Image (cartoon, helix red, strand yellow):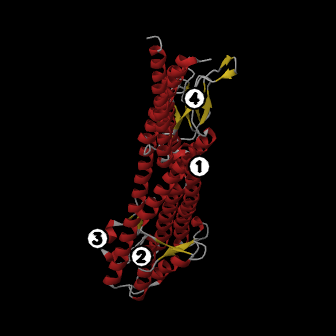
Amino acid sequence: MPGLFGTLDMGTRALQAQRQGVEVTGQNLANVNNPAYARQRLIMRASSSQSGSMGSQGTGVQAVSIQQLRDTLNDRQIRSETSVSGFLSRQQSALQNGQALLGETLQQDPQTGTITGVATSGSNGILSQVNNLFNSFQSLSTSPASQTARQSVLNASQELAARLRSASGRLSDLSGSLNDSITADTTKTNSLITDIADLNNQIVQAEAGTGSTANDLRDLRQQKLEGLSSLVDYNTADNPDGSVNITIGGNLLVSGGDVLDTLQTYDPGSGSLMLRTASTNTPVSLTGGSIQGAIEVRDGALKDLQSGLNSLARSLITEINQVHRSGYDLSGNTGADLLTGTSAANISVNAAIVADPRKLQASGDPTAAGDNQTALALARLSSQPITSLGQQTFAQQYTASVTSLGQALNSTNTRIDDQSIVQSMLLAQRDSVSGVSVDEEMTNMMKYQKAFEASARLVTTVSEMLDSVINLKR
């Protein structure tokens, strides 16, 4: 039987266990606003019993371990969905910027939300400028010798060319910004890889031979892993020593506490940065994360839009010049081009004609200044299918390019809304397991407090009993 001294030991162990319970509860409460923290719970069990004349008799309680409440499957799902969110967020931001720089208002079906076209009413975008140019040709055809009508054509031509150059330049700047973001995110990725490897080392050292779990270090590593997920998608493998391996794009970058390789950006020759491993120069293919989101939107929707603008500019230059070159100016001269350049980046208006509107070739007859055949032919181009534009008119081709961008943004917005719901559900699931509840912790605090007081009373009672026994000998 334990006896009085055994009972005193029982009370001491109980005091220690309840004190540790209060400490763990205090740790939970201290981290109630820490999103990376997973609540902890003190695991207690009955102390080893002793055999006596009356049978097995208990010897109290002892604290065994501090358990971290985490659902590893849920954590993996959150990391996976964080990668998707990072991918979509970067795409959304770039597409919004791309749409804004065009200055166009998109028409949307109120029932389905589908993008149906580009609004021209009250707009001053490229589509309106295309229409203004051909309207000015039509006006010129009614007064071929009018200086005012000729100046109107030149003003419309210059405005359209300026809008195309501006849009092209802004798209190029946006692509450059995406390259910069890829470089910055790659630097962040390498920093997180190094941090995770360092935490692997610390966790292994803290847990080696102790049988305990380095809960706070694991919380910090989970936070780093989720931060990495927003940048790139990756696979992890748990090691028996508590460390994790990280593989990105099929390349093992972190093995336990060692960083085997890092990532770097490189230019494959197109001016668009891609990703590869730093030591082996192996191209890295990603499927998620903000880096891949930037790469896909840069080489997808934005590149298509830039290509569409260039096609529009080239076709305008070719078709308008072909007609204009065959006409005659007020002095009977012919063969001059109205537009110069080869793409949206450098389209411009013939400086000689800008300086002297009389050189605008609107007539189809070198001897008749009032002839309007060339001006009419220029005006008719607006409704003619253009072979180089896939048998679309200028307006149709531009509308299709802008609509495609709008549809991509619309689709991304929808996916982000859906993704937010999934992300919220997973976070709610984690909070139900790992989140700190102030009410629950305060209840536990009271339980540990009362148990500590009762254990202290047991020690006091045994002490009084020992005094009584000692006094019997006096």
Q: How many C-alpha atoms fall within 10 Å of the one at disc 1: few (<14), some, or many (≥20)?
A: some
Alpha carbon of mark 2 to alpha carbon of mark 3: how far? 29 Å
Front label number (4 vs 3):
4
Could you tell me if the residues under marks 2 and 3 are in contact, i.e. CB atoms within 8 Å?
no
* Rendered view: 104 above or below 190: below
Which residue is at 46% across, 29% downward? 456
SS for dot 4:
strand
Marks 1 and 4: in contact by CB < 8 Å? Answer: no
In the image, residue 187 lies at what x, y percent?
43, 36
Q: Amino acid at mark 4?
A: Val
Callout in the foreground (3, 1):
1
* Image location (x, y in percent) of residue 181: 43, 45
The label number, if any, that marks residue 123 in the structure image: 2
Mark 2 vs 3, N-terminal side: 2
Q: At x 49% / y 60%, what residue is drawn?
A: 310
Horizontal and vertical percent for residue 472?
47, 14
Of marks 4 and 1, the one in the foreground: 1
Callout 2, which amino acid?
Ser
Spatial CA span between label 2 and label 4 = 56 Å
Label 2 with label 4: CB-CB less than 8 Å = no
| Mark pair 4, 1: CA separation | 23 Å
Tell whether label 1 touches label 3 (CB within 8 Å): no
Residue found 41% across the figure and 85% down from its top: 139
Residue at the disc numbered 1: 429
How many numbered badges does the structure rendering display?
4
Find residue 355 and name its label: 3
Question: In the rendered structure, which amino acid carries the disc numbered 3?
Answer: Ala
* Upstream in sequence: badge 2 or badge 4: 2
Question: Which quarter of the image is occupied by the N terminus?
Answer: top right
